[in-house]
Amino acid sequence: MGKTKTMKTLIAYSTTHGCTGKVALELKEKLGGEATLINLKEDRNPSLALYDQVIIGGSIHAGQIQKRVKEFCAKNLEQLKQKELGLFICCMYEGDVAREQLRNAFPEELHQAAKNEAFFGGAFDFKRMKFFEKMIVRKVAKVNESVSNLDYGKIDNFASRMNKIFNPFLFLV
Ligand SMILES: Cc1cc2nc3c(=O)[nH]c(=O)nc-3n(C[C@H](O)[C@H](O)[C@H](O)COP(=O)(O)O)c2cc1C
Protein backbone atom coordinates (compact mmCIF):
# COMPACT_ATOMS: atom_id res chain seq x y z
CA MET A 1 0.00 0.00 0.00
CA GLY A 2 1.11 3.56 -0.67
CA LYS A 3 1.89 6.08 1.98
CA THR A 4 -1.29 7.09 3.81
CA LYS A 5 -2.06 10.67 4.68
CA THR A 6 -2.04 11.42 8.38
CA MET A 7 -5.45 12.42 9.63
CA LYS A 8 -5.46 15.90 11.14
CA THR A 9 -7.90 16.65 13.92
CA LEU A 10 -8.74 19.92 15.59
CA ILE A 11 -10.24 19.75 19.08
CA ALA A 12 -11.75 23.19 19.74
CA TYR A 13 -13.12 23.54 23.24
CA SER A 14 -14.14 25.90 25.98
CA THR A 15 -13.86 25.16 29.69
CA THR A 16 -14.98 27.23 32.66
CA HIS A 17 -13.40 25.25 35.49
CA GLY A 18 -11.11 22.84 33.65
CA CYS A 19 -13.21 19.69 33.24
CA THR A 20 -13.80 20.07 29.48
CA GLY A 21 -10.12 20.92 29.09
CA LYS A 22 -9.25 17.62 30.75
CA VAL A 23 -11.60 15.72 28.42
CA ALA A 24 -10.15 17.50 25.37
CA LEU A 25 -6.65 16.43 26.42
CA GLU A 26 -7.83 12.87 27.01
CA LEU A 27 -9.35 12.80 23.50
CA LYS A 28 -6.15 14.14 21.98
CA GLU A 29 -4.19 11.32 23.60
CA LYS A 30 -6.69 8.66 22.49
CA LEU A 31 -7.00 9.81 18.87
CA GLY A 32 -4.68 8.43 16.26
CA GLY A 33 -2.93 10.76 13.82
CA GLU A 34 -2.27 14.39 14.56
CA ALA A 35 -4.56 16.18 16.97
CA THR A 36 -4.35 19.87 17.85
CA LEU A 37 -6.00 21.33 20.94
CA ILE A 38 -7.35 24.87 20.80
CA ASN A 39 -8.94 26.61 23.75
CA LEU A 40 -11.48 28.99 22.20
CA LYS A 41 -10.81 31.41 25.03
CA GLU A 42 -7.29 31.87 23.71
CA ASP A 43 -8.05 31.62 20.00
CA ARG A 44 -11.64 32.46 19.12
CA ASN A 45 -11.35 31.80 15.42
CA PRO A 46 -8.82 29.12 14.49
CA SER A 47 -8.39 28.35 10.80
CA LEU A 48 -10.16 25.11 9.89
CA ALA A 49 -8.57 24.62 6.48
CA LEU A 50 -5.74 22.49 7.88
CA TYR A 51 -8.01 19.84 9.41
CA ASP A 52 -9.92 16.82 8.10
CA GLN A 53 -11.72 16.28 11.34
CA VAL A 54 -13.07 18.73 13.94
CA ILE A 55 -14.27 17.96 17.46
CA ILE A 56 -16.10 20.73 19.32
CA GLY A 57 -16.67 20.63 23.07
CA GLY A 58 -17.91 22.82 25.88
CA SER A 59 -19.64 22.64 29.24
CA ILE A 60 -23.13 23.52 30.41
CA HIS A 61 -23.81 26.28 32.91
CA ALA A 62 -27.41 27.24 33.68
CA GLY A 63 -28.53 25.14 30.72
CA GLN A 64 -26.24 26.75 28.14
CA ILE A 65 -22.92 25.96 26.50
CA GLN A 66 -20.29 28.74 26.52
CA LYS A 67 -21.14 31.67 24.26
CA ARG A 68 -17.79 31.41 22.49
CA VAL A 69 -18.62 27.83 21.43
CA LYS A 70 -21.92 29.03 19.97
CA GLU A 71 -20.13 31.86 18.19
CA PHE A 72 -17.47 29.51 16.80
CA CYS A 73 -20.18 27.18 15.44
CA ALA A 74 -22.25 30.00 13.95
CA LYS A 75 -19.28 31.67 12.30
CA ASN A 76 -17.90 28.45 10.76
CA LEU A 77 -21.15 26.59 10.08
CA GLU A 78 -20.63 25.88 6.37
CA GLN A 79 -16.99 24.82 6.75
CA LEU A 80 -17.77 22.63 9.76
CA LYS A 81 -20.45 20.77 7.79
CA GLN A 82 -17.73 19.66 5.35
CA LYS A 83 -15.60 18.06 8.10
CA GLU A 84 -15.71 14.76 9.89
CA LEU A 85 -17.46 16.27 12.88
CA GLY A 86 -17.71 15.28 16.55
CA LEU A 87 -19.65 17.21 19.23
CA PHE A 88 -19.51 16.79 22.99
CA ILE A 89 -20.46 18.45 26.25
CA CYS A 90 -19.54 18.11 29.90
CA CYS A 91 -22.47 18.49 32.26
CA MET A 92 -23.69 17.11 35.58
CA TYR A 93 -27.23 16.19 34.57
CA GLU A 94 -27.64 12.77 33.02
CA GLY A 95 -30.23 11.02 30.82
CA ASP A 96 -32.89 13.05 29.05
CA VAL A 97 -31.83 16.39 30.54
CA ALA A 98 -28.25 15.84 29.34
CA ARG A 99 -29.52 14.81 25.90
CA GLU A 100 -31.65 17.95 25.70
CA GLN A 101 -28.71 20.12 26.80
CA LEU A 102 -26.54 18.52 24.12
CA ARG A 103 -29.22 19.10 21.48
CA ASN A 104 -29.58 22.72 22.53
CA ALA A 105 -25.81 23.36 22.66
CA PHE A 106 -25.16 23.08 18.91
CA PRO A 107 -27.00 24.27 15.78
CA GLU A 108 -29.37 21.72 14.24
CA GLU A 109 -27.34 21.68 11.02
CA LEU A 110 -24.25 20.53 12.93
CA HIS A 111 -26.21 17.76 14.64
CA GLN A 112 -27.28 16.60 11.18
CA ALA A 113 -23.70 16.67 9.93
CA ALA A 114 -22.04 15.18 13.02
CA LYS A 115 -20.69 11.63 12.91
CA ASN A 116 -20.39 11.41 16.65
CA GLU A 117 -21.98 13.14 19.66
CA ALA A 118 -21.77 12.55 23.39
CA PHE A 119 -22.12 13.86 26.92
CA PHE A 120 -19.40 12.65 29.24
CA GLY A 121 -20.61 13.70 32.68
CA GLY A 122 -18.70 16.41 34.48
CA ALA A 123 -17.15 17.66 37.69
CA PHE A 124 -17.77 20.24 40.37
CA ASP A 125 -14.44 21.78 41.32
CA PHE A 126 -14.99 23.91 44.41
CA LYS A 127 -11.42 25.21 44.33
CA ARG A 128 -12.06 26.92 41.00
CA MET A 129 -15.60 28.16 41.54
CA LYS A 130 -16.45 31.72 42.45
CA PHE A 131 -18.34 32.41 45.67
CA PHE A 132 -21.64 32.83 43.85
CA GLU A 133 -21.14 29.65 41.82
CA LYS A 134 -20.47 27.65 44.99
CA MET A 135 -23.68 29.01 46.45
CA ILE A 136 -25.67 27.93 43.40
CA VAL A 137 -24.12 24.46 43.31
CA ARG A 138 -24.76 23.92 47.03
CA LYS A 139 -28.35 25.00 46.63
CA VAL A 140 -29.27 23.41 43.30
CA ALA A 141 -27.12 20.27 43.19
CA LYS A 142 -26.92 19.87 46.99
CA VAL A 143 -23.20 19.19 46.69
CA ASN A 144 -20.69 20.64 49.15
CA GLU A 145 -17.37 19.38 47.90
CA SER A 146 -15.52 18.63 44.68
CA VAL A 147 -16.79 15.58 42.79
CA SER A 148 -16.22 14.11 39.35
CA ASN A 149 -18.46 11.71 37.46
CA LEU A 150 -16.59 11.84 34.16
CA ASP A 151 -17.26 8.71 32.13
CA TYR A 152 -13.85 7.68 30.79
CA GLY A 153 -15.37 4.67 28.99
CA LYS A 154 -17.56 7.01 26.96
CA ILE A 155 -14.55 9.19 26.15
CA ASP A 156 -12.69 6.08 24.90
CA ASN A 157 -15.64 5.06 22.73
CA PHE A 158 -15.97 8.54 21.30
CA ALA A 159 -12.28 8.60 20.34
CA SER A 160 -12.40 5.19 18.70
CA ARG A 161 -15.56 6.10 16.76
CA MET A 162 -13.79 9.21 15.46
CA ASN A 163 -10.87 7.04 14.36
CA LYS A 164 -13.09 4.47 12.66
CA ILE A 165 -14.76 7.08 10.51
CA PHE A 166 -11.40 7.87 9.03
CA ASN A 167 -9.82 4.47 8.66
CA PRO A 168 -12.20 1.97 7.06
CA PHE A 169 -9.58 -0.75 7.58
CA LEU A 170 -10.29 -0.60 11.31
CA PHE A 171 -13.62 -2.29 10.56
CA LEU A 172 -11.70 -5.36 9.46
CA VAL A 173 -10.00 -6.01 12.79
C1 LIG B 1 -22.69 27.57 38.35
C2 LIG B 1 -22.84 26.24 37.68
C3 LIG B 1 -23.97 25.97 36.91
C4 LIG B 1 -24.12 24.70 36.29
N1 LIG B 1 -25.25 24.45 35.55
C5 LIG B 1 -25.40 23.22 34.99
C6 LIG B 1 -26.58 22.93 34.24
O1 LIG B 1 -27.47 23.77 34.01
N2 LIG B 1 -26.71 21.67 33.75
C7 LIG B 1 -25.76 20.69 33.94
O2 LIG B 1 -25.95 19.57 33.49
N3 LIG B 1 -24.61 20.95 34.63
C8 LIG B 1 -24.43 22.20 35.15
N4 LIG B 1 -23.28 22.49 35.84
C9 LIG B 1 -22.21 21.46 35.91
C10 LIG B 1 -21.13 21.70 34.86
O3 LIG B 1 -21.61 21.48 33.56
C11 LIG B 1 -19.96 20.79 35.18
O4 LIG B 1 -19.39 21.26 36.37
C12 LIG B 1 -18.92 20.71 34.08
O5 LIG B 1 -18.07 19.61 34.33
C13 LIG B 1 -18.10 21.97 33.99
O6 LIG B 1 -17.11 21.82 33.02
P1 LIG B 1 -15.90 22.88 32.92
O7 LIG B 1 -15.08 22.70 34.16
O8 LIG B 1 -15.17 22.48 31.69
O9 LIG B 1 -16.52 24.22 32.78
C14 LIG B 1 -23.09 23.73 36.44
C15 LIG B 1 -21.95 24.03 37.19
C16 LIG B 1 -21.80 25.25 37.80
C17 LIG B 1 -20.54 25.55 38.60
Image (spheres, rainbow, N blue to C red):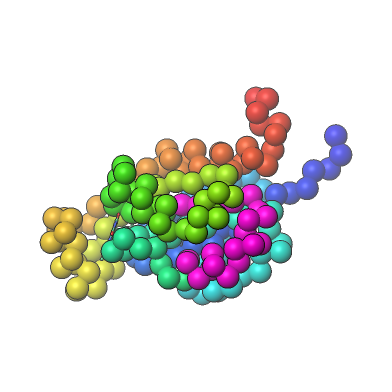
In the rendered image, residue 162, in percent from the top left (x then y), is placed at: 59, 43
Query: Is residue 36 in view?
Result: no
* Ligand 1 location (quadrant): bottom left
Numbered range of the magenta stretch: 69-88
Q: Nearer the viewer, residue 34 or 50?
A: 50
Viewport quadrant of the N terminus: top right
In the rendered image, residue 131, in percent from the top left (x then y), is placed at: 19, 73
* Residue drawn at the location 66% of the way across and 69% of the way down: 47
* Residue drawn at the location 65% of the way across and 28% of the way down: 171
Q: Quadrant of residue 37?
A: bottom right
Q: How many marks?
A: 0
* Residue drawn at the location 37% of the way across and 43% of the way down: 151
Q: Which residue is outermost to the top? A: 173
Viewport quadrant of the C terminus: top right
Does residue 63 appear to the left or right of 37 in the view shown?
left
In the rendered image, residue 146, in percent from the top left (x then y), is placed at: 23, 57
Does residue 19 appear to the left or right of 128 in the view shown?
right
